[in-house]
């Protein structure tokens, strides 16, 4: 019993580090028109500040009712719409994670999408900028590969 309590205390004191992203690996992921469509749809879902849920808990089921989505939930919804199911490590999402990591290298986020969304210093304009930067990178990668 003591070990369980000690382990719990340790886990609460030192949260698990975020999944390590290797920028070179992300930039070498194959991108497709679907990645572009995911990012465009996420931008549309977060077009106005009134559509943004800045208190993400990664529970997206009430988004339709509230009309608000977090960054994670907008990307989740866009991925489902484009791919037919949620793909956690889809290139479009990895590019968004990479942009966040590069913008906030010392933030120590456990879950980049949720924690960046919920960071009190993050604004709706920041969310839009992250999506736009990821979209620019995906389009650049597509152009390198000769994709439309």
Image (tube, rainbow, N blue to C red):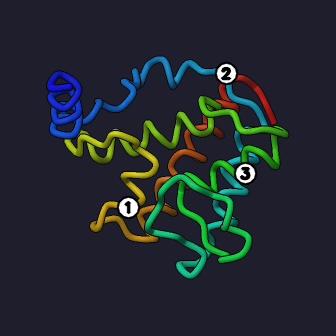
Q: Is residue 53 left or right of residue 51?
A: left
- The residue depicted at 34 percent of the width and 65 percent of the height is 122
Distance from Cα at disc 1 to Cα at disc 2: 29 Å
- The residue depicted at 14 percent of the width and 28 percent of the height is 6
Q: Which residue is mark 1?
A: 118
Q: Is residue 122 left or right of residue 93?
A: left
State the residue in front, 103 or 122. Answer: 122
- Please identify the quadrant where the N terminus is shown: top left
Q: Which residue is mark 3?
A: 78
Looking at the image, tell me whether mark 1 or mark 3 is earlier in sequence order: 3
Q: Is residue 126 left or right of residue 141?
A: left
- The residue depicted at 57 percent of the width and 82 percent of the height is 50
Residue 19's x, y, as percent?
Answer: 39, 27
* Marks 1 & 2, CB-CB < 8 Å contact: no
Q: Nearer the viewer, mark 1 or mark 2?
A: 1
For the residue labelled by badge 3, is the local secondary structure a helix, a strand or a loop? helix
Looking at the image, tell me whether mark 3 or mark 2 is earlier in sequence order: 2
Q: Nearer the viewer, mark 3 or mark 2?
A: 3
């Amino acid at each position: 019993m003591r070990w369980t309590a000690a382990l719990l205390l340790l886990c609460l004191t030192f949260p698990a580090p975020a999944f390590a992203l290797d920028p070179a690996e992300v930039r070498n992921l194959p991108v497709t028109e679907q990645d572009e469509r995911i990012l465009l749809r996420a931008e549309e879902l977060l077009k106005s500040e009134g559509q943004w849920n800045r208190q993400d808990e990664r529970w997206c089921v009430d988004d339709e009712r509230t009309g608000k989505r977090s960054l994670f939930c907008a990307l989740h919804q866009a991925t489902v719409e484009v791919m037919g199911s949620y793909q956690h490590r889809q290139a479009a999402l990895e590019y968004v994670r990479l942009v966040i990591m590069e913008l906030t290298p010392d933030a120590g986020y456990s879950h980049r999408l949720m924690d960046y969304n919920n960071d009190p210093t993050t604004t709706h304009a920041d969310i839009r900028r992250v999506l736009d930067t990821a979209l620019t990178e995906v389009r650049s990668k597509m152009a390198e590969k000769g994709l439309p």
